[in-house]
Amino acid sequence: MSECGSYTLLKKSSQCRARLGRLYTARGNIDTPVFMPVGTQGTVKGVATEYLKESGAQIILANSYHLYLRPGTEIIKRAGGIQEFNSWRKPMLTDSGGFQIFSLNEIRKIKEDGAQFQSHIDGSRHFFTPEKSMQVQKDIGADIIMCFDECAPYPASYEYAKNSMELSLKWAAKCKDEFYKDDARLKQALFGIIQGSVYDDLRKISAQKMTEMDFTGYAIGGVSVGEPREDKERVIEVVEPLLPENKARYLMGVGMPEDLWEGVQRGIDMFDCVIPTRNGRNGQVFTSLGKLNIRNAEFRQDFTPLDPQCACPACKGYTKAYLNHLVRAQESLYLSLLSLHNIYFMINLMEKIRKALENDSFFEAKEEFFRKYYNRKS
């Protein structure tokens, strides 16, 4: 049996850095490149587990900080772990809580040995250390867990980014020590996170030192926090050559269709983002023919499906006109239908990309996708 979190490179593109692979976990194997729907509080918002499984999703993500606050890790542990608690029973990944250092900056304080948070639920104070993050994630029981780190904001000064990157390296070493104190590695994998903001030299130092620690996989963090797209793509290009070929690469928090193609092209294997469900709740859907805002008046009498190439429940059972009505009437059904459609779109997109890599036709597939998506050549 392969080690949890281990990665096998199956094929490399002859056209670019893109790669086809397989990631192994105790709850099933994952074909990569892969998109992971985000279920921050143990559920992909508005989408029932059975529909999520039917979408073809291979792995979903949850956030350990939020689950620690509510319902509490003791309840999840007593349930048999997060997959038993939420009835997913397939691979899951948990974020360490490090992103909350960025997103909850008004109610947290960073110290050398951890970060103090004030709960957004009841105002109670909680101190997260690398060791505590490891124990919380072990109790939650996801297949892949992440090192506790600081996600620096954008823009950040060079000095701030350097201090943040160095602190993340110190915390990563502590995470590794804590993780390997018991037999967690038999059913969980620990990924390191590379930081350094948009500064190339800091990213290189972080990548070199992180890979020296020899984690099971590696993530590029601190992107999609407001930086220009060209900076994000350059960061990947700086870091990717320094990463081991036989380990998974994960670009955190990235999920627009354009970013998925560009990330895969540069050698990334794993992606996650709240965009499919967040945008769906706001009435925006992704289709093979481009993005649509379904609340627009042009769809009030459009009796065609959202996307002729999609087999999701929203496309198989309803028309744009009906979905337009649901959104305008604020009927809660649309929240689920549009969120689920967007997840189907992302999962199907990654299937297209994997098939293109199997056929060694990545750029041809990319051009065809964007010709339809933008109604012009990419």
Image: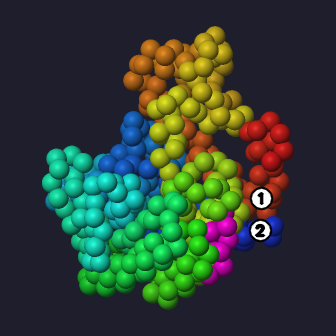
- In front of the other: 128 or 78: 128
Rendered image quadrant of residue 12: bottom right
Label 2 Cα neighbours within 10 Å, binned few <14 / some 14-19 / many ≥20: some
User: Taking 168 as reference, is 227 left or right?
Assistant: right
Residue carrying label 2: 16
What SS does tag 2 mark?
loop
User: Taking 47 as reference, is 264 left or right?
Assistant: right
Say if residue 193 shows up in the picture. Answer: no
User: Taking 13 as reference, is 166 left or right?
Assistant: left
Residue lying at 68% horizontally and 55% vertically, measured from the top left: 261
Q: Is the magenta stretch mostly helix, strand or loop?
A: helix
**Is residue 40 in the magenta section?**
no
Residue carrying label 1: 362
What SS does tag 1 mark?
helix
- In front of the other: 158 or 293: 158
Question: Which region is colored magenta?
Answer: 233-243
Mark toward the start of the polypeptide (2 vs 1): 2
CB contact under 8 Å: marks 2 and 1? yes
Point out residue 255 in the picture as x, y percentages from the top left corner.
Answer: 57, 51
Point out residue 289 in the picture as x, y percentages from the top left corner.
Answer: 72, 34
Amino acid of disc 1? Phe
Point out residue 317 in the picture as x, y percentages from the top left corner.
Answer: 55, 23
Tell me, for residue 36, which label it has, or none.
Answer: none
Amino acid of disc 2? Cys
